Amino acid sequence: RDITLYIFGGASNIEGEPKKPSDEFLISVVGPLTSLGLAAIFFLLEQLVSPPIRRTGAWAAATLEYLAYINFVLALFNLIPGFPLDGGRVLRSIIWAVNRNYDSATRKAGFVGELIAYGFIFLGLLQSFVGDSFGSGLWLAFIGWFLLNAAQQSVAGARVRGAVKNVTVGEVMEPSTYAAAPTYTIAHLLSQFFLPKNLHSLPVVQDGHLLGVVTLMHINEVPQEEWGTVTAAGIMTTGEEMRIVHARDHLEQAVDLFTGTDLDQVPVIDQNGSLVGTLTQAHLLKWLQIREQVQRRET
């Protein structure tokens, strides 16, 4: 879907999780293999211009040598089995192929990733305060801290996916109690819904069918002197831009919808397009907490 850049590198955000271990393995291993391939290409080019002729040749040889070295080091670093590095994902694919359980493989690969992250942090601090390279050691510790957070988030995500597996949105949603007519003015929406009910968004319904969604952001874009005349129909989000879920959808789809967005709730409709409920992020988190507590008692 997109790529998120961090100070230590970047992460590809994929629309969905791999369907089988072989897919995970191929997706993960292609990055380090590309780095190794680039390292080989730059090394061969460096050999072609060596021994360097004049200053220009020396500059080209040095550049190619550095590019070969940095790509080789990058490949080795990404092959470290510290989830969610590529090497950690390769490890997860192998565990997944053996035990046939994606969530269990994620937890085990994440545990290995946490151990490696703690190792980075320890070595970095040791190098900073005992060795003679404070800057490099501190950088290594920061990399370990970053990997630790990434591994913990990945394990937490696997736990959530395991909890919501085979659960539908209809089983978790709250029955819809608040909805606006398309003719309601912004002043009416604020006085009757948003302020007294502490809402951030509100579905717009006509004859039971969902027409759109009005949010506080939409209202803030309208000058205050027009709040008495502008209606919900004039500012609501409609069509494909509207974030909705169906009651029969798997809850995992709704979790993905909340992830990486500022949404706090989404309308739930049935197969006829009628509004049947609302799925809020707060209610979903509370449901997950209760489910986790129940599962702990059962085990």
Image: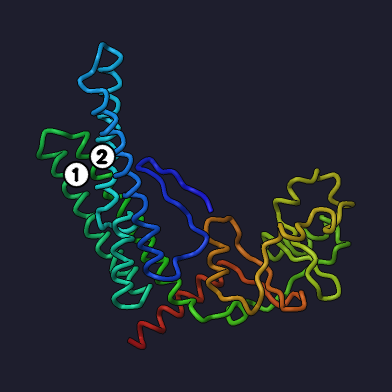
The correct choice, above or below, for 219 with respect to 91 in the image is above
Side of 225 relative to 258 (left or right): right
Q: Residue 124 carries which label?
A: 1
Q: Pinpoint residue 278: horizontal percent, then vertical percent.
A: 66, 72
Among the two numbered marks 1 and 2 on one chain, the one whose residue lies closer to the N terminus: 1
Relative image position of residue 47 (x, y in whole percent): 23, 28
Q: Where is residue 27 in the image (x, y as percent from the top left)?
A: 40, 58
Mark 2 Cα shell of 10 Å, populated few (<14), some (14-19), many (≥20):
some
Rendered image coloring scheme: rainbow
Q: Which of 132 and 15 is in front in this view?
A: 15
Q: Inspect the image, locate mark 1, and give the three-letter code of the amino acid beneath it.
A: Gly
Q: Is mark 1 on a helix, strand or loop?
A: helix
Q: Which of 105 and 159 is in front in this view?
A: 105
Percent of width and height locating residue 26: 37, 60
Measuring 27% from the left and 59% from the top, which residue is drawn there?
113
Name the mark on residue 139.
2
Q: In which quarter of the image is the C terminus?
A: bottom left
* Residue nearest the observer in this picture, 86 or 20: 20
Q: Check whether the beta carbons of the residues at disc 1 and disc 2 lie within 8 A of each other.
A: yes
* Residue drawn at the location 29% of the way across and 71% of the way down: 95
Residue reaching furthest bottom?
Answer: 298
Q: Which of 30 and 119 is in front in this view?
A: 30
Identified at 36% across, 86% down, the residue is 297
Q: In this view, does 13 lie above or below 278?
A: above
Which kind of residue does numbered mark 2 sit on? Trp
Residue 265 horizontal side relative to residue 42, left or right: right
